Amino acid sequence: MFTTLRAYPRLLKANWSLAVEYRAEIILWFLSSTFPFIMLGVWLNIAKGRSLNGFDENAFVAYYLAVAWVRRINFVWIIHDIEDRIRTGELSPFLLRPLDFAHHIFTKVVAVRLYNAIIIGVVVGVIALLIPGQQFDIRPLNLLLFAFVIIIGFGFEFLAQYIAGTLAFWTTQVQRIHDVWWFAKTLLGGFLLPMSLLPPQAQAIAQWLPFQISIGLPVEILIGRATPERIIFGLAVSSVWIIAMFIGSRLLWRAGLRSYGAVGA
């Protein structure tokens, strides 16, 4: 454990350098991530002059601005990286290193996400200042809670992608499996629309799934719409799922290595 912790600053520094080197790519990612703003336009048109479950026009603007920022902070896309290394045999050199492969890929993602948080946060902040009437709860304690939930949400995103990528040990249809997961997460996790606007039956299902920790819950905290009961319940449910996913990811990885037979293994 001590050896691992000593290696983290160096890994983070190296991956941070890569993130900064390709900084223009971050802006392009943001400009291409127009989906929250498309949904914002849809709901603004629907909510003209009225409130939907407590969401008026200003609330919708705040919600989808927060979605755009949160999505760029905890977005993880490592499935193809893992799949390609398993399929081509590029995973083999990592198996000879003292640190588990997961640490290398984790620090790579963390460095990029930190850079995203700063750059995209500034952009969203400027937009929020230019559009009056936005409601963000920026009290220090609430921001600390938001940061804590974001970290847990990032852990969920990483584990979900890591598990999906690990399935490449046994199948070439990893992307198809992940697409089903992504659709469910988009619909029930607060990315497509606020969870309070889902049908009651969908809300009842969503509250027992971990998807809320990715987008819905941190966004609701940031805009000051999450009750203490909602926060506690959401964290409890998501924590149980994440612990189970962590254990499952390690078991899958070890089982996959036993069947690993790519070139160079």
Image (spheres, rainbow, N blue to C red):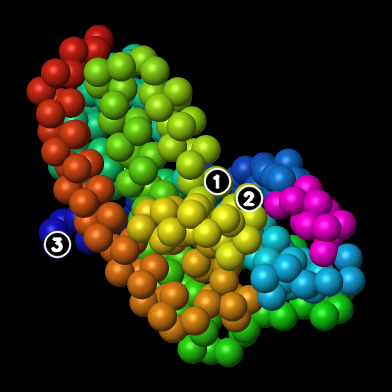
Q: Which residue is mark 1?
A: 186
Location of residue 125 with respect to 86 vertically, above or below: below
- In the rendered image, the quadrant that contains the C terminus is top left
Picture residue at 28% right of the left edge, 55% below the top: 241
Amino acid type for the residue under numbered disc 3? Phe
Location of residue 233 with respect to 245 vertically, above or below: below
Kindly report the distance in space between the C-alpha atoms of the residues bearing marks 2 and 1.
Answer: 6 Å
Badge 1 density bin: few <14, some 14–19, many ≥20, Cα 10 Å: some
**177 or 261: nearer the viewer:** 177
Amino acid type for the residue under numbered disc 2? Leu
Picture residue at 38% right of the left edge, 39% below the top: 161
* Mark 2 residue element: loop
Please provide the residue range marked out in magenta.
36-47
Majority secondary structure of the magenta segment? Answer: helix
Q: Do the residues under discs 2 and 1 have CB atoms within 8 angstroms?
A: yes
Image x and y of residue 118, in percent: 61, 64
Picture residue at 28% right of the left edge, 30% below the top: 166
User: Residue 21 falls in which quadrant of the image?
Assistant: top right
**14 or 26: nearer the viewer:** 26
* Mark 1 residue element: helix
